Image (cartoon, rainbow, N blue to C red):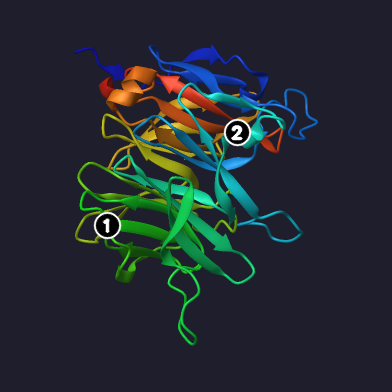
Amino acid sequence: MRRVLLAPLLVTLLLAAPAAGGLRLPPGFTARVYVTGEGFGSTAVGGAGVPSASTLSIDADGVLYLARTGRRYMVGGEAEDLWRLYRIPPGGGRLTPDTEAAYLHGPPLPNPQVATIRSGRELFVTTFDRDRKIGVLYAMRDGRAEWFAGGTPPRGQTPLLRQPEGAVADRAGNIYVADRDQGVIVKLDAAGRVLEGRWLAVTRPRALAIDRSDHLWIGSDGAAQAPWQQGPGEILRVGPDGQPQVVLRGPVAAALAVGPNGRVFVADRQHAAVFVLAADGTRTEFARFTDNDAPRSLAFAPVTEATRRAGIAGDLFVVVINRGAWPVNEVVRISGPFEELTAGR
């Protein structure tokens, strides 16, 4: 089988839309804009895109879900914090103020983030009430937000979740939730009952991924007060026994995703790159963004009959922020032989 090495010498691929800018990828990989739009307030040149989104995930049918940023990390000022999710059918979409309503999904939620999709079907969303410092984990079913964990505790008790961020499910269906404010990973059983409210202590955990062997990968913001700051951050790998290992120090991971080949991909917003990270800390660049772009979130399309029919099975989807055209983002789809990637140089 031909194997693709992530070599330092990368080819340059120019994307179709100016807001996505340029992207360098290894040979054999291609990219195109998958979700974009216009008319959402950016006055910058090349300001095509959809309202700023920070998280995404893809279900077994190839439907892509995006969540707007809200004001989770704002230091001051006023901003709207009640948003609905975007639901993008297979094939992508182009949103405008006139067509946006057709893509909206679920009720308005406070500062929502797409957390995970369990078993390719169950969409989980975290919310954060910034004023009350109380968070909720919802399961979204047929466009309805159903309480799963967190929320206002009984009088005199501490909230289970204060600022829940990413979440993932292991093979048994247990859910792990990163609570950035409390600096812990919370472990829930498949029905949402609390197994361990402080399963692991981590400084400002936010991004989560879980690999094929049920090792939990955690992106910690570390010293960064907000995810777009320099950090330094940490990426940890935790075995099923709960023992953590610091794999990498330095970058603040905007997002983590496990690819079809079992490799962990990291979105590095500060250095405008996506790299592959091995358990021994080996870091190999996969994609380099140019023209002031940077990755903000990552998700791989699961490999199912539906995604094969849609032609996106195993593809990597990246929320791209054009820092010169804020506050709009685009979603870029990267296709290629991910199964053949190695972490070699």
Tell which residue pokes out farthest to the right in this image. Answer: 43
Compare residues 71 and 310 and report the one nearer the observer.
310
* Residue carrying label 1: 174
Up the image or down, 163 lies above or below 206; here it is: below
Up the image or down, 7 lies above or below 325; here it is: above
**Is the C terminus in the top left, top right, bottom left or bottom right quadrant?**
top left
Residue 68 visible in image: no
* Residue carrying label 2: 102
Q: Secondary structure at mark 2?
A: helix
Would residue 108 appear left or right of 92 to someone viewing this image?
right
Three-letter code for the amino acid on which mark 1 is drawn: Asn
Contact, CB < 8 Å: mark 2 with mark 1? no
Residue 255 visible in image: yes
x, y (%) of residue 136? 48, 63
Taking the spot 47% from the left edge, 45% from the top edge, the residue there is 253
Quarter of the image where one finds residue 303: top left
x, y (%) of residue 245? 29, 55
**CA separation in Å, label 2 and label 1:** 33 Å
**Is the N terminus in the top left, top right, bottom left or bottom right quadrant?**
top left
Up the image or down, 102 lies above or below 13; here it is: below
Quarter of the image where one finds residue 238: bottom left
Compare residues 330 and 219 and report the one nearer the observer.
330
x, y (%) of residue 53? 59, 41
Taking the spot 72% from the left edge, 32% from the top edge, the residue there is 97
Taking the spot 34% from the left edge, 18% from the top edge, the residue there is 309
Q: Work out whether mark 2 precedes mark 1 in sequence or the reverse, and give the earlier one.
A: 2
Would residue 324 appear left or right of 253 to someone viewing this image?
right
Q: Secondary structure at mark 1?
A: loop
